[in-house]
Image (cartoon, rainbow, N blue to C red):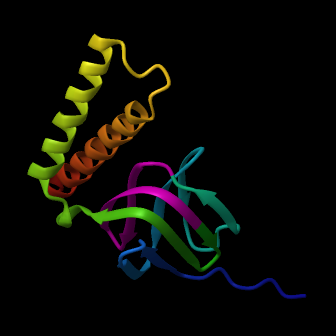
Amino acid sequence: MAIPPIPSQLTLEIVTPDRAVAHADVDEVEIPGEDGYIGVLPGHTPLLTSLKVGEMWYRRGVERHFLSVAFGFAEVLPDRVIVLARMAEKAEDIDIARAEAARRRAEERLAQAKVTGAGRIDHDLERTRVALLKAMVRLNVATRARTRG
């Protein structure tokens, strides 16, 4: 039985419940898997992973494209990566002022919960922590994309 050739590129698809975010042929992908970041090159062993809140990037040639993603799943095949995310946003689409405001709101809610002692079994507190993490990732992604040369 002949071994199939290693593909030269990956087809990347990133989809949210609202829209298709990206569809491109790429050379490399890094995704925020639940157990850590996963680097994917053409020919990668098939796997399925859940996604955490984090930065994602893909590379075509020397150019990297950054995204903020949160929750969902990624399927990796030797020639394809499919990301089904609850939230995915390209760096250039991130509204920095809105992300800064979300970060400030989350920080204020967390500080208030510490002062009042609220949140022992508070689902709102956990949602606030996730909101803070998402805002910080969005800001990091937006900043990274705008400062690269």
Q: Position of residue 55 (x, y in %)?
A: 37, 52
Give the quadrant of residue 19.
bottom left
Q: Work out whether residue 30 can be spotted.
A: yes
Q: Work out whether residue 149 can be spotted.
A: no
Q: Which residues are magenta?
A: 52-74
16 versus 87 height, above or below: below
Determine the residue positioned at 46% across, 78% down: 13
Residue lying at the far left of the rendered structure? 97
Q: Position of residue 70 (x, y in %)?
A: 42, 55
Within the magenta stretch, is there residue 67?
yes
Count of picture labels: 0
Q: Position of residue 93 (x, y in %)?
A: 19, 66
Within the magenta stretch, is there residue 49?
no
112 versus 130 height, above or below: above
Q: Is residue 15 left or right of residue 140?
A: right
Quarter of the image for the N terminus: give it: bottom right
Q: Is residue 43 left or right of residue 30?
A: right
Residue nearest the observer in this picture, 98 or 25: 98
Residue nearest the observer in this picture, 98 or 63: 98
Give the quadrant of residue 104.
top left
Helix, strand or loop: magenta stretch? strand
Q: Position of residue 106 (x, y in %)?
A: 25, 34
Residue nearest the observer in this picture, 31 or 104: 104
Residue nearest the observer in this picture, 43 or 71: 71
Quarter of the image for the C terminus: give it: bottom left
Determine the residue positioned at 37% across, 34% down: 129
Determine the residue positioned at 53% across, 74% down: 82
Determine the residue positioned at 54% across, 82% down: 8
